Image: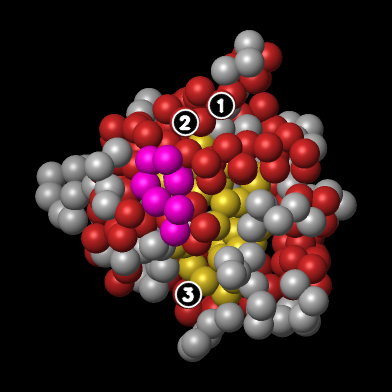
Amino acid sequence: MRTPLIAGNWKMNKTASEAVRFTRELVQQPLSTSAIDVVIAPPFTALAAVRDSLGPAPAIGLGAQNLHWEDHGAYTGEISAPMLKDLGCRYVILGHSERRAQFGEQDDLIHKKLLAALKHELKPILCVGESLSERESGTTAEVIEQQLNGCLAGFEPARLTNLIIAYEPVWAIGTGKAATPEQAAEVHQLIRRALTAGWSASVAASTRILYGGSVTPQNVEGFLASPDIDGALVGGACLQVDSFATIARLAQKQTGH
Ligand code: PGA
């Protein structure tokens, strides 16, 4: 059984003080996380403050949005996996399309970051997704397979037990034009087939695959109704307590708890 996961990607939003106000409000929401995992990924600068505001034994997990592949060294401006672990992070988003498009991240670099995350027992949320022109030219499957093969090359299946994948079609991110649940489910199935072929049936069965791209309280149930969609990576709608908590509540409800 895959535990549904709702993750909020704050991107470059909220100062540490704003993050504290948000988190204090979020933890007061009537939100049961007995059957789902809920994660928030604030900017690096707010991680410590958010961790403190979540309190001891938090029901909500902490994630980062990126890391450097080395543990330490002369990498001005970078943050490593041990630094994130030390701050209480349990998750890290890797290979987001904004990092690919705006910061030149390619699959081989994301591969190195995945190695670092797994070495330090951070659960990676590996983002894959096609652009609009790739979808329109019918190369979605090829693009996704290439991204998976490039990022996950050489990993023993046993190393991938903590892997989480987020399917985020680039054309759906921040556009208000979410994929349909059918479009998403089709790619999620394709990802599972690729995981079976390239790694193992058990990796394919255990890996949680999230949908991301304009997820809202209004459309999240449609995605979660699909047996191949194990949760959501939420951008814009995670920045308000109400909408993020509602999305998490709907995910919890869907599990029957
Ligand atoms: P969005 O972003 O929900 O604002 O489309 C999702 C993401 O980029 O992870």
Q: Is residue 14 above or below residue 88?
A: above
Q: Is residue 133 magenta?
A: no
Residue 148 lies left or right of residue 61; in this view the side is left
- The extreme left residue here reads 73
Does the beta carbon of the residue at mark 1 sit less than 8 Å from ligand 1? Answer: no
Does the image show residue 10? no
Element assignment for label 1: helix
Residue type at mark 1 is: Ala
Residue type at mark 2 is: Glu
Residue type at mark 3 is: Arg
| Label number found at residue 145 | 2
- The extreme bottom residue here reads 56
Q: Residues within 10 Å of mark 3 (few under 14, many from 20)?
A: many
Q: Nearer the viewer, residue 26 or 20?
A: 26
- In this rendering, the count of numbered labels is 3
Residue at left offset 41%, top offset 62%: 162
- Quadrant in the picture for residue 242: bottom right
Q: Quadrant of the N terminus?
A: bottom right
Which is more N-terminal, label 3 or label 2? Answer: 3
Spatial separation of the CA atoms under disc 2 and disc 3: 36 Å
The part of the chain drawn in magenta is 195-202
Spatial separation of the CA atoms under disc 2 and disc 1: 6 Å
Residue pointed to by mark 1: 141
